[in-house]
Image: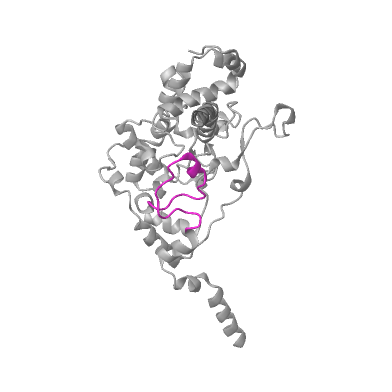
Amino acid sequence: MKRFLLFAVVAVFISPAFAGAGESGTEILKNRCASCHDLKGPAPQTIRQLWKRDAPDLFYAGNKFRREWLVAWLQKPVRIRPAGVNYLRNINSTPPENQKTKSGRKFDVLYGKVLKPLKHATLNKAEAMAVTDALMELKPHYDLVANVKLDTTKKVTLDQGEVLIDKVYGCQSCHQIEPGYGGYTGAELYTAGRRLQPEYMLSYIKRPRSWDPKIWMPNGHVKPADLQKIVNYLILLSKEDFDASN
Amino acid sequence: MRLIKLMFAVAMLMFIASPAIHAEEAYLNYKSYCMQCHGMHGKGDGVNVPAMNILPRDHSDNKYMMSRSNTEIYKAIKFGGPAINKSVKMPAWGDTFTEEELTQLVGHIRSLCCEKELVRGVNFR
């Protein structure tokens, strides 16, 4: 009995639920997230400021993310951008001709911490809910999504969507539409529909600059009809189960 | 007289220093936006390339780059590949760069491909 009591006391002490019970979502954000994530804005205005970014900006999280996804991700964080948030920190150049490695690599390669699983604080369910509530309050860019609406009548099949992403607008050069299929420097697209609000996707693709002035995503001048189709495709794509096919 | 000398010195300094500053800005822009596909040394071997079906231009390829005018390079950056009958994989960066940055980038690309010609003072048009 004594041993059981001791065990129970120890368990309560080391359990993160206990440790986090006193903290509100905003406090958790302030204490544990603010050192890497920007919670106040504005987004970096010069390229030098942008290269100092360690983690995605969260000051417009309420305009950006879907609540369900945030709750789940905070409990089990995984990497979303294969080359990291600041890709230049995580690439290595092609070796010179006379120093070719055995693998015979011909291109710049990813290196460093992006090759290992993401290091990110993991929250328990209660904390994740609290933090998500706090994040969803952060909505400074209401103006950018106010007049944007997803037109679900502009349906596309997976194949048609892939043609748009790969051949028509060339998004796949930087973004992956399947695990391991596409470029590395952009965020993965096969989870985008689950991660992001449709209005955010529409507005961001239309003009990335208005959200993040110096980001290395170009304005693809996507036609309005194609924009709707692309976002519908991303939502359709995120419903695919990629683990099953691999 | 002293003041005039000082002003002259400052003017000289600005004249010497300003191209260097431009070169640095252009290099920083190249590094931030172009390197992901054109590679760390501009050889068209960027980190994203293995997934591509059309390879990015090797900016150190003197022979090819000399067959292109500055206007074409400028157009390719500003309006994307299709503007000069090339692939859509080269996106339009007109919304990202100012006119000044675009011209500086063209200069930077020239310094990657055609240093000898730059020294000789070739007119790239």
Q: Locate residue B63: give its quadrant.
A: top right
Check the image and report above or below for B115 versus A133: above
Where is residue A80? Give x, y as percent: 50, 47
Q: Residue at x 35, y 48 (%)?
A: A197
Q: How many marks?
A: 0
Residue occupying image coordinates x 48% and y 20%: B73
In the rendered image, residue A49 lying in the magenta stretch gets the answer yes
Magenta residues, start to end: A34-60
Quick check: B5 left or right of A169?
A: right
Q: Residue furthest left?
A: A147
**Viewer-proximal residue among B50 and B11:** B11
From the image, which quarter does the N terminus of chain A lie in? bottom right
Query: Residue A231: in sight, yes or no?
Result: yes
Q: Residue at x 44, y 46 (%)?
A: A191
Identify the main secondary structure in magenta. loop
Query: Residue A35: percent from the left, percent from the top?
Result: 50, 57
Q: Is residue B34 visible?
A: no
Quarter assignment of residue B62: top right
Q: Is residue A193 above or below residue A227?
A: below
- Horizontal side of A204 relative to A190 (left or right) equals left
Compare residues A198 and B68 and report the one nearer the observer: B68
Give residue A234's position: percent from left, percent from top.
39, 41
